[in-house]
Amino acid sequence: MFRPISALAIVFALALQAPVLAQQPTPREKKVRDDKVKVEADGFWIYNNLPKAFEEAKKDAKPIVVVLRCLPCEECVKLDDNLVDKDPTLRPLLEKFVRVRVVSTNGLDLSTFQYDYDQSFAVFLLNADGTVYGRFGTRSHRTNWVGDVSLDGLAKALEGALALHAEFPKNKDSLTAKRGPAPLFPAPEKFPLLGKYGPEIDYKGNVVQSCIHCHQIGDAIKDTYRKKKEPLPEEVLFPYPHPKSQGLILDPKERATLLKVEKDSPAEKSGFKPGDQIKSLNGQPLLSIADVQWVLHHTSAAGATLKAEVVRDGKPATVSLALPKGWRERDDISWRVGTWPLRRMATGGMVLESIAERPAGVPKDGMALRAKSVGQFGAHAAAKNAGFQAGDVIIKFDGQTDFTREADLLAYALRSRKAGEKVSVTIVRGGKTMEMTLPMQE
């Protein structure tokens, strides 16, 4: 049985442990420091020094492989461990690159390193002049990467980058679109939200607290628009759409090759077939699923047709991927850590879930989103402070009754409502209908 512990007992226990805690770094702190010692001692990777990598690449005329890895995050651990430990399949390929491991985004050139900031593991394949050959690293679940990426898939991406490098600069025009528009700020610490951080992590002090994580860049982008009272753009609300949201199920062990095409999806209607290897999409050569996401990320939510060059049964073919209006919103964003600040802004910290069986008092038709949990602290406690409870079922939000997913409600609120405004919310609790008011926040 759980027994409450008094505050005095906790203080006394911490006081007894204080000398020990002062001498021993936290597990996360130790992980970062141990990684630095291990990788630098081995010497196979340049550690956290991009200028040195570019200098060596120019001197040796080699391509560059940059692994961005948020060490305290546990996702993709096995993939990262095998890569750093020089998997025998990858070793001969990696030796053809200048290799650099980056463990924080402090000081990162965001005009070059544009990627899905909800990832904790991302690979860039580059030319010494900064031209991007391709990206690698995808996840569509909060804790699971299996099904999206593999070491075999990374090997195929490395081979593809070497082929592009061999043709460079003849192919430079086809690679131009692999860089996006100028970022809001040139480096993460230039964002107002991240202004307390420096351009480098502090190995002399608290390493973990000085490190800017990938997801914090995404949070800072959202914060910038929200503070300016501007609607969040579609590419911020639904970033890097997963190809499966359009019916493209890619083989994690291959280079942009289809395992399956979902029935009645945009991909099937466009004529894609299982086994198709997508060589290029919208004119860009593809090295991995992340490259497919990059193209989708920079495609208008209003709809578009993207030309795809494929190899089908050993022969070249052309397929046009027709994306209808609103195609982005087919994607699932609930797993993303970047959805947490959206919940703070739009639902006061509530996590909402769709329900199949409707409890008493909930209409048979229309919206039915249940509060799976309600935040308890800070700005994430706004819904709690407004009287909402876990288990409440939302049937109307700001007059709208047609949201079938949490993502639909979030998108509406963050496109239509500004921070400081209040919206009316109708809920069902214990079989009774209640009218509530929810504040919109920054």
Image: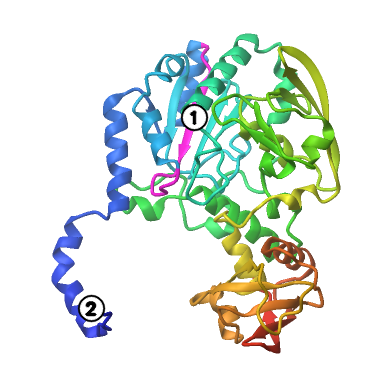
The range drawn in magenta is: 61-75
Amino acid type at image mark 1:
Val
In this orientation, which residue lies closer to the viewer: 195 or 283? 283
In this orientation, which residue lies closer to the viewer: 204 or 338? 338
Q: Residues within 10 Å of mark 1 (few under 14, many from 20)?
A: many
**Magenta segment includes 72:** yes
Residue at figure coordinates x 49%, y 29% from the top left: 66
Quadrant where the C terminus sits is bottom right
Does 425 appear above or below 151?
Answer: below
Residue 99 visible (yes or no): yes
What kind of element bears circle 2? helix
Residue 385 falls in image quadrant: bottom right
What kind of element bears circle 1? strand
> How far across and down, in percent of the image, does residue 131 sit?
63, 24
Amino acid type at image mark 2:
Ile
Does 361 appear above or below 304?
Answer: below
Main SS of the magenta part reads loop
Does 242 appear above or below 411?
Answer: above
> How far across and down, in percent of the image, does residue 290 sit?
62, 34
Q: Is residue 128 left or right of residue 227?
A: left
**Magenta segment includes 291:** no
